[in-house]
Amino acid sequence: MRHSRRAHAVLFLCRDNAILGPMAEALLNHWGRGRFTASSAGWEPAPGVHAVAVRVLRRAQLLPVVLKPRPLSEVAGPDAPAFGVVVLLGHEFPGGTVPLKGDPALARWHISDPAAIAGPMEAQDRAFERAFREIEARVKIFASLSLEGVDRLAAERRLAEMEATAATS
């Protein structure tokens, strides 16, 4: 008899959840191959996912299930799942504590906001593709981690080591 393992619930959290969060969610749901269930949310969600991010995800054949940025309150309510890992994306982080169930491991992925790039569409496309590749590199490493039987502190240590490896690659 096979024992079915529960997927690790992971939340990608960023300010507006319009670019980095949807990319990370789609990538982990793809590369996690059922071991992970990714969601994303923002503490100041935008009205929609950025059009260039949608284009990048479409080219990669990885459209997120939800094309409308979710507010943090949607994934932090009493009926929300308990996340084992929360990954803060970008360079901005919410003030105070993040009101989530349980005691999730916390990671920070410092990825530049591609929307900050001004200039011709080609420059913007390159910035979005670069952010996508940076997230994908981290997601591939993350998806290869064994988190079975690992406590929160050990998971945070592994995540920090993973971030350092990805940042120097």
Image (tube, rainbow, N blue to C red):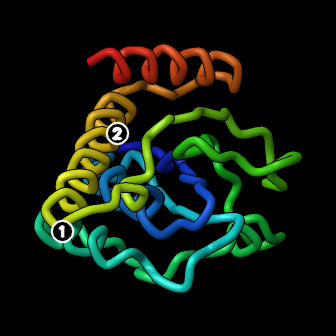
The x and y percentages for residue 67 are: 41, 81
Q: Nearer the viewer, residue 165 or 86?
A: 165
Three-letter amino acid code at disc 1?
A: Met
Residue at image coords 30%, 68%? 53
Q: Position of residue 115 (x, y in %)?
A: 40, 61
Residue 122 left/right relative to 28: left
Foreground: 95 or 80?
Answer: 95
Q: Secondary structure at mark 1?
A: helix
Quarter of the image with the N terminus in it: top left
The residue at 31%/78% (across/down) is 51
Which residue is at the far right?
96
C-alpha span from label 2 to label 1: 27 Å
**Amino acid tagged 2:** Val
The quarter of the image holding the C terminus is: top left
Residue at 84%, 55% in the rendered image: 99
- Provide residue 126's location: percent of width, then percent of height: 18, 53
Q: Which residue is mark 2?
A: 139
Judge depth for marks 2 and 1 and give the one in front: 1
Q: Residues within 10 Å of mark 2 (few under 14, many from 20)?
A: many
Answer above or below: position of 64 versus 34.
Answer: below
Which residue lies under the disc numbered 1? 121
